[in-house]
Amino acid sequence: MTEQRESPGEPEVPAPRGGRVTLREDVRAAWLDAGLGVLVTAGVFALLYARIRSGASDTVSVMPFMKDAGTFWMYFLSQAFGWSALLWAWGTVILGLLLSGPGVRRTPRSQRALERLHRTTSLSTIALITAHALLFAAELVRDKAELGWASRFWEAFWETFVPGGYTSGTGQIAIPVGQAALYLAVPLGLLFYVRHRIGPRTWRVLHRFVIAVYVLSVWHTLLYGTNVWYDGWPRTTLWLLQLPIAALFLLRLARPLRRTEQLTLPAPHRRGPRRLAGWSVRWGLTVAVAATAAVLCAVVLTGHDGGRERPAAEPTATP
Ligand code: HEM
């Protein structure tokens, strides 16, 4: 069976031998990069843990009560999963933009390999985000020792997974932003496996919104990550890493794989209201992404990364 691509002018990409790709196959194929994700998480955890022990951690500077690394290990492991999740999200967005933009010249075989890597890294990203959130919930369960078990689990679930359930400080915004990223990532990522039911066109339109998941993830991290809390190179690097995404996004808009998505005005006999609306949206997006790229350059060049000012002395109380 060959994959049905309905837009004219698209290269025909043969489906994998054996027919339609299933979620089960991709989950099996994702073990390798999910395993790599766990290894990266372990490395980040070791680094964060060592920094807590040495007193160099910014997390402890923000929350001095966390200096006992042994007690709060689940919190630090949650942070580590957050970083690997963000890295995997970054990678899979890059792959997606390469696939839908001009990319490099590809053979059908390398195209299939790239598509498969995009799908497996997306599945790994969902797993890593879930682990990040679950470990945060586990830390809350541990922390609420004064309550009975049922209340501990209920409150941890409420604060972690229900928008508005977490009511402390910046978390009132940052946690719902993270939740929105997780709750959008799951359907937008998994709809691919039911696209034969909803129709490839509907799937493609919905899948485009997946970029919002990435934007929300970065926003959540900049708002709430205590390791990028203060201004300085870790936070500036996080901004810098968004430049390749913005550049590829611009390239994807300027030179899309599908002829029907070009920025040039459709030919007069094709200028129906739907085509014109699509064309205006593409131009609006192009201007917005170009403006974002300019802001990213300004942040990186000036070092004004929106971080808090580092306190001169170690704080004595929890901010
Ligand atoms: C239910 C959804 C989520 C919850 C409850 C949650 C919770 C948290 C919390 C409490 C923090 C603060 C940790 C700190 O002190 O630094 C945090 C930071 C972070 N989160 Fe999330 N998050 C969610 C979704 C996401 C998503 C979707 C991503 C990215 C794909 C992500 C990536 C990160 C990163 C990279 C950090 C910074 C960790 C650090 O500073 O070391 N989170 N998250």
Image: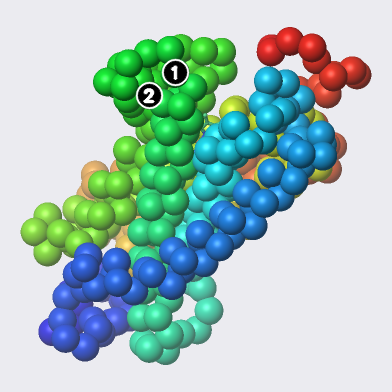
Return the disc, 2 or 1, that comes first in the chain's sequence: 1
Can I make out residue 276 in this image? no
Q: Is residue 239 above or below residue 251?
A: above
Instruction: Identify the mark at residue 144; answer none if there is no mark.
Output: 1
Image coordinates of residue 181 in percent, x first then y, are 41, 38
Q: How many numbered markers are drawn?
A: 2
For this orientation, the residue located farthest to the left is: 197
Q: Quadrant of the C terminus?
A: top right
Residue occupying image coordinates x 44% and y 18%: 144
Dot in front, 2 or 1: 1
Q: Residue at x 60, y 31 (%)?
A: 71
Nearest the viewer among 108 and 230 is 230
Residue behind mark 2: 156
* Residues marked 2 and 1 touching at CB (< 8 Å): yes
Q: Characterize the local packing of mark 1: few (<14), some (14-19) or many (20 or more) Cα atoms within 10 angstroms.
A: some
| The N terminus lies in quadrant | bottom left
Q: Classify mark 2: residues with Cα within 10 Å, few (<14), some (14-19) or many (20+).
A: many
Is 283 on the left or on the right of 87, as rendered? left
Name the image colouring: rainbow
Position of residue 196 in the picture relative to residue 204 (left or right): left
Look at label 1 and name its amino acid. Lys
Q: Is residue 238 above or below residue 230?
A: below
